Image (cartoon, rainbow, N blue to C red):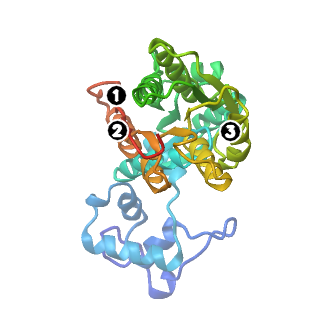
Amino acid sequence: MKAREQEGEKSSPQADREPRRSRASGRARIEDVARLAEVSAQTVSRYYREPAAVSADASARIRRAAELIGYVPNLIAGSLASNRSHIVAIVVPTIANPAHSVWVQGLTETLAAEGYQVLLGATNYDPARERDLVRAFLGRRVDGVVITGAVLDPEADDLLRRVRVPTVQVLELPRNPIDMAVGVDNQACGAAIADHLVARRYRRLAVVGSRAKADTRAAARAAGFLRRAQERGLARPVELAVDRPADIGVGPQLLADILAIDPPVEAVFCVGTQISVGLMLACLAAGVEVPRRLAVAGFSDGDLAAMLSPSLTTIRVPAIEMGRKAGQLLLSRLRGGEPDAAVADVGFQLVVGDST
């Protein structure tokens, strides 16, 4: 019997509608779905490309047939036909720091609402790894790239600028963004903490940064803190650094180093969430009274800061809103439009806890 092309009409006898699998892959094919749903293969293809263009009845039968035989559409083939992959690459320095998971959540929710999926890669603060990820993602023909802060590797930076794929840099406000940026003034964050500690009459200050040269955001916060403290008439704060900024396990050794400083440090600013949490927990375990013996201030993750005892003074950044804004900018560019502003400063809030 000849196959009929109208939606809803049988394309073959019942026996002929039994699902067949490709011998090469063992996977269900679009023809298998069409046979079982009693529509043409073109109708099935149209359903996955333009669902609104297929009748409700045919759509329901296609969904049931696909679920029955475990059919998954070939998105690679679809992307070749449409020149769109509907995939966005996200490049972060680490997945160990929960601060990144929050803005990534806001980003992925915004993209998913428009049918985009994501690929995620972590650089571990390694410029060479960043370059490899950027090249690999662009090779997969992603529709857009969201990357954390300044691009560290010159080759990766140059590649993103030449390929001209829509790109959003997050968490920083670079002077010369690759394309678009959503972030916060990290130096201003550090300065705000210094102003707060000076207002609380702390005089002997310290700042704990990261030894990872690639952590440009932490370096900017530390620089802002140091400069403002000296502008306010204080001696240059003591500078310390940790090797593992995303590990709360640095706390005990960090506390030991701080307590060994003479004359004693009165207050310390930790430029990262995990560092400040690790130090607070170490103080609790060692019986060091906060803030009576040592005042502690941190950065980001206001919810976690409030759960500590005493509650942590911190800089709160609207991370989930930052991710959503990054997604909105990217979608605007992908639709062929231009965002109202290519660079967006989401601002920050000083949250005063009991730790200072």
Q: Position of residue 98 (x, y in %)?
A: 54, 49
Q: Which mark is residue 3?
A: none
Sequence order check: which comes first, mark 2 or mark 3? 3
The reply to whether residue 86 is visible in this rendering is: no
Q: Which three-letter amino acid code belongs to the residue tagged 2?
A: Lys
Q: Residue at x 53, y 57 (%)?
A: 74
Q: Which three-letter amino acid code belongs to the residue tagged 1?
A: Ala
Label 2, label 3: how many angstroms apart (C-alpha)?
Answer: 25 Å
In this orientation, which residue lies closer to the viewer: 292 or 160? 292
Q: Which three-letter amino acid code belongs to the residue tagged 3?
A: Asn
Sequence order check: which comes first, mark 1 or mark 3? 3
Q: Residues within 10 Å of mark 3 (few under 14, many from 20)?
A: some
Q: Residues within 10 Å of mark 2 (few under 14, many from 20)?
A: many
Rendered view: 187 above or below 246: above
Query: Which residue is tagged 3?
Result: 124
Helix, strand or loop at label 1? It is: strand
Q: Which mark is residue 344?
A: 1
